Amino acid sequence: MKNKLKLALCQISSKREDKAANLQKIEELTLKAKGQGADLAVFPEMCLTGYVLLDQVYELAEPIPGPSTKQVEALAKKTGMHIIFGMPELSEKTQATVYNTAVLVGPKGFVGKYRKMYLPTHSVFEEKRYFRSGYEPAAFQTEIGNIGLTICYDVFFPEVFRMPRLMGAQLIVCISASPAVRRSYFEVLTAARAIENTCYLAYVNLAGVQDGLQFWGGSRLVSPTGDVLAKAKYDVEDFVVCEADFGDLRTAETFIPTLRDLRPELFEKLRQLSEQI
């Protein structure tokens, strides 16, 4: 396993309902990342299909593994890269149950997936109308490090990030489709999630406009002490290669001992109180 991980923040503007065009963009930027020595290319939430799909999501969703994931697997094998991207996942057990899913593939094929736990259904968001919530945290041991997966609105809920960290994640990746009105929240929360878990956090957001929604971009790599080590442009497509040095985790954990000081007995009280809201 590497002590240093070089990753590419692939901040793209997806074409709605056009998998072929979006897969082409994933391939082009993965090859570009490979050319710049990256080990991992990260793409935004729902980048395979576009975020604003409405009822069309049922036609575009695929099982995982499925045709699109197999195409990205072939790209990962060809380049020797690890790739993370977002897509609508069709349940293997039903015909119309869909998840908002992050997929991780590597040179040896499919590594794992994460189904978004928290689905925003307020203001401009209506994810619960279309998606089923996920239930399992995700962290995967790979040749390039232990990588946790989260998606967008999950960042508002500390427990979603704490779980992959306790599963050994050195880098937690949050893929996103956040509109501009939420920019200030995400800039604060991504730093908070990195600090409280003393791990690296890579946030990769959509850019551009879909159905009147302006996605603000601003993808970034945050250090275990909350420093923004690299940041993409706002609002437009961008591509940034940066590095996470896992050797810094021990120093961060020593001086910000949040993991050592965890009080698991409080989690039961949290459960009881949350049931009384």
Image: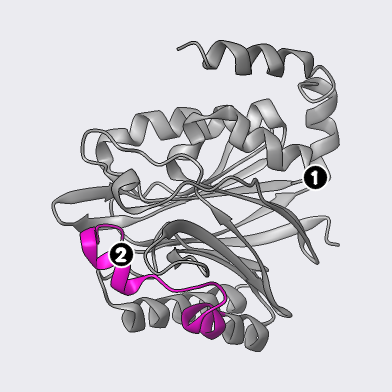
Q: Which residue is mark 1?
A: 168
Does residue 226 appear anywhere in the picture? Answer: no
- Residue 122's tag is none
Locate residue 238 relative to residue 235 in the image: left or right. right
Residue nearest the observer in this picture, 187 or 158: 158
Q: Amino acid at mark 2?
A: Gly
How many marks do you count on the picture? 2
x then y, percent, for residue 138: 66, 50
Callout 2 crowding tier (Cα within 10 Å): few <14, some 14–19, many ≥20: many
Locate residue 66 relative to residue 50 in the image: left or right. right
Q: Which residues are magenta?
A: 51-72
Q: Earlier in the sequence, mark 2 or mark 1?
A: 2
Q: Amino acid at mark 1?
A: Gly
| Residue at the left extreme, as displayed | 212
Q: Is residue 49 magenta?
A: no
Locate residue 165 relative to residue 79 in the image: left or right. right
Q: Which residue is mark 2?
A: 50
Q: Is residue 65 magenta?
A: yes
Locate residue 35 relative to residue 118 in the image: left or right. right
Q: How is the image coloured?
A: one colour
x then y, percent, for residue 45: 42, 57
Residue at horizontal 56 percent and vertical 10 percent from the top: 273
